[in-house]
Amino acid sequence: MGNINLWGYDPHVIKFIHVTKEYARPEPALKDVSFHVVKGQFSFLTGHSGSGKSTALRLAHLAERPTHGEVRAGGFSSLRTSRRDVWKLRRKVGYVFQDFRLLPGRTALENVSFALEVIGSPKEQILPRAQRLLGQVGLAPKAGSSVGEISGGEQQRVAIARALASEPLLLLADEPTGNLDERATRGILDLFWEINAMGMAVLMATHDLELMRRYPTARVLELDQGRLVYDSSTTEPVESVRDESSRPGSGVSPDPATVLDSSGETSSTSALDSAGEPGPAQQREI
Amino acid sequence: MSRDRPNNERSDVLYTVRETLLAFKRAPLLTGLSAAIVGLALFVVGLFGLATHNVRLYLETIEERVEVVAYLRDDASTADIAAMEGVLTMLPEVLAVDFVTKAEALEKAYTELPEFNEILTDLEVNPLPASIEIQLRPESRTAVTAGRIAQQATLHPIVEEVQYGEEWVDKLSALRRIGFVTTSVLGTAFAVVAALIIGTAVRIAIFARREEIKIMQLVGARDSFVHRPFLLEGGITGALGGALAVLLTYTTFWSVSNYLFTISWIPWEWAGIGISAGIVFGVLASVYAVRKHLREV
């Protein structure tokens, strides 16, 4: 049994508990990283390339296991979830890639239907649900288009619709706008924000400062050389790197956008609150 | 938690069958070639089976002639002969005991050895001894048993000499053993070849669909759901190979029987076992390939 949430409500959709991930190279990809994400929270995971962002997301999806420490995601622990049960976690945690990973030669609708089919949706529900999901990401008119014929932004929307197929608690996105132009990027970000407003937690890895500036209420976690050096949800410096976090030019933390994060609520949070789900406003309560 | 439940088994089965048929449609050459090679490998097994079966039948007809003959002294009384027959009949290895008189022996010599007829006619005294022919039960037609019965018969005072053809009885046993071992070893070797071919074909199929598999694992497909089409594919390849092997073996049997010499067809159960073995090997090879190659995304 990988599900650890047996005794009641657990607001955490992700917990990293002293996580270290080592590969066959001198420096570990992640060093003693601890943080958690609560239900309905929108978080950016930032840092330079090679800082460990993708590794953290892969660990949260149990595509890999930590070398030390524990990762919990969607109620599943890296210590207790067997390889055979990883599929259960995958249905609670959606994943979106920079390169979309769609099935080429198939239509947008077929790509989403495929996901619904493989998770065992009843046959008669597959088509209407796939159409509804595409509608949700604003792609209903392009449902019948082959994914090779639509733009990058539209392809990413298909990938997001696919990730939503299993109605996950949490969406992990690894540089989802990395291959997109500015306009498409804005559209995709707005879409993530809307999805979050419906109560789904989002953890998005990005190194795009502009992006984070545009959503000042989102929480920001910063990784640098495998260490968590900044967490906007806490006023305290991150304990494990107390000295390093204050050094000049250590990353994006001195940026005005991230400083803004730790300030008060905005109008968008009240909209989320009215949806009855915890939103970015709750981030400081963890 | 309803999302975790493996729901809608029927659509799962439909998916498995459809994906398997699609795989055959997508790569007919790969499937056809692997089934053909599996068929050829199993055909070799079939040929050995056919040969072994016929050698066995032939040896059985020879073995029926394995008997112990006790030649009797001319002065043996009827009572002694009856007593000896009684003792021999009681032995568990003995099927039947047949007394052949001197006159019957001579008559037999006339019919079986016509070239000596003149000599036999010229004889004034019948030189052939009376004998008791001891037929053994089928399971006792071995050199050891025949030797033991011969030994017992020799001890009887009215017996002059005992013959049971020990040399060729020994050779027959050796031949049977060689046939059995050869078929087993080659059968196993070619069955392994067939399994390796199916495993490789499944591996290629997995490689061809790796992107699709990654996406399936990404969105939370159960392992069994991902694996089943490949297992079915392996099983069907094995079944096709097995059927082809039976067809080729039957063609060989038919050709040999019609154009060379008459042989017997193997029992149909063997053919059934062959095809079943093809399926089992196909599925097992696929299980191995799938386990080895379908790791995490």
Image: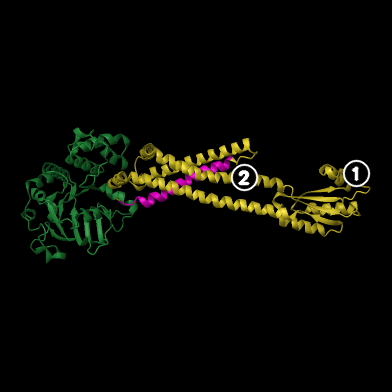
Which element type, helix, strand or loop, lies under badge 1? helix
Which disc, if any, is residue B53? 2
Question: Which chain does tag 1 point to?
Answer: B
Magenta residues? Answer: B268-296
Chain letter, green? A
Quadrant of the image occupied by residue A157: top left
The disc numbered 2 marks a residue on which chain?
Answer: B
The local crowd at label 2, few if under 14, some if 14 to 19, many if 20 or more residues have their Cα within 10 Å, is: some
- Residue B235 shown left or right of residue B126 in the figure: left
Colour chain B appears in: yellow
**Residue at (10% x, 47% y) in the render:** A269
Q: Is residue B224 left or right of residue A130?
A: right
Is residue A220 shown to the viewer in this render? yes
Residue that carries the numbered disc 1 in the rendered image: B121
- On the image, the x and y values in percent for residue B77 come to 91, 53
Where is residue B98 shown, x and y percent of the image?
82, 48
